[in-house]
Image: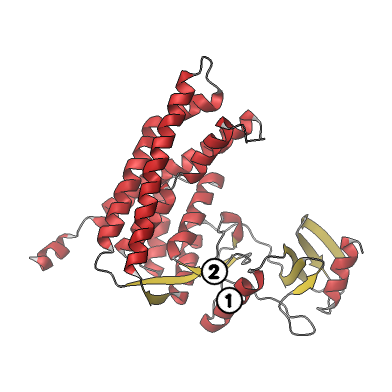
Amino acid sequence: MTYLKTVQHILHTYHVKPLVIEDITDRLQRIDDGQQLYAFKRVQVTDQFVNRMNYAYQQAHDKQLRCMLPLYLTETNELFTYDNDNYYYLTPWIASDTSPLNHSLQTIGSLHQKTTETYVMNMKSFKDKWKDYQNHCQTNFETYLSYVAYFEKAHYMSPLGLQVCTHFDRIDSVFKILQDEIKQLLEESSDQIKSTYCLCHGQLKPSHIIGREDVFILNWEKSQPAHASLDLASYLKNHIIHENDPMAHYREAFTKYMKENKLKKQDLHLLTIHLLDPTEYMTIIKQTINSQNEQSMIKQVQKLQQHYRQLLFGLQWAQFIHDTYMIPELDDINKEN
């Protein structure tokens, strides 16, 4: 059966008779039946897909989340259809541009606030996890120094090697501030017994959030219950790559998020740590040195520069969070006295 026939067959289970089937990507079709438009999505089978989608849409139902597009039910009242190692689902087609930064963060904040749950932390596990990561960061920094030394010894430095050496001062700052953030996280959490999780999208990027008046978040295949900082870091990192607004816009938009879902100091440290994580930057260098990167040198340089921009943003973010949320207010100091 051809893919077109498969699409027509599955749409029949929704009682949809398509007049036009337009390929948007190899996994997304725009369906027009003459009365309304649909988005038809194909997802490769994974062990967790059904559980994740069921969790997300149960949350949408229970918490009345208006930012999630409804799923149409099949004739047998199923949310998804399975065929030939793929899942398929159908939603309304929303013709709209990417949502502006401030609207997006406000919507994410509302989503997180409405789905937040509190749980009792295992403090030993929590501390062990972040101390291990702290040690990992120190090892990563030593590895980074060895990469710089490797490139500096070359008689003719490659474009990527020159790039790595040029980045040194800022990457050095990334590792130092990252260590400081982890230390502060552990100190801030020392007297904390509880933490929170919420419905997280799992792969937030600007293209997944559309609309201005009515804002919708698309593609929930990787949703999970997790800490809000993961969604925020994912969105901000991707926004820097694709949009790269002035820092003032991010500061203003984050105040919209905080009005919807006010994060504690511990949460803010977690967010900053995620934004300063150099793993992807380090991976590109390692793959290049070990000749494991099949991309052209131009592509490698472009990719490294993108992750460098993310880390520069992380440095600016750390300063913004420190100045705005970490310095005690005069009223707080007076209360303590």
Q: Earlier in the sequence, mark 1 or mark 2?
A: 1
Residues packed near mark 1 inside 10 Å, few (<14), some (14 to 19) or many (20 plus): some
Residue sitting farthest toward the right: 1
Q: Is residue 170 above or below residue 247?
A: above
Circle 1 — which element? Answer: helix
Q: Is residue 19 above or below residue 323?
A: below
Give residue 16's position: percent from left, percent from top: 83, 76
Say which quadrant the C terminus sits in: bottom left
Residue sitting farthest toward the left: 337
Residue at x 75%, y 59% (from the top left corner): 27
Q: Is residue 124 above or below residue 150?
A: below
Residue at x 62%, y 30% (from the top left corner): 298
Give residue 231's position: percent from left, percent from top: 49, 61
Give residue 23's position: percent from left, percent from top: 80, 57
> Mark 1 — residue?
55
Residue type highlighted by circle 2: Gln
Q: Which mark is residue 85?
A: none
Residue type highlighted by circle 1: Tyr
Give residue 300's position: percent from left, percent from top: 59, 34
Say which quadrant the N terminus sits in: bottom right
Residue 329, quarter of picture: bottom left
Task: Say if residue 112 shows up in the picture.
Answer: yes
> Mark 2 — residue?
224
232 sits to left or right of 218: left
Residue sitting farthest toward the top: 155
Q: Is residue 27 above or below residue 320?
A: below
21 sits to left or right of 193: right
Residue at x 43%, y 57% (from the top left corner): 253
Q: Nearer the viewer, residue 43 or 45?
A: 45
Task: Say if residue 19 shows up in the picture.
Answer: no
Circle 2 — which element? Answer: strand
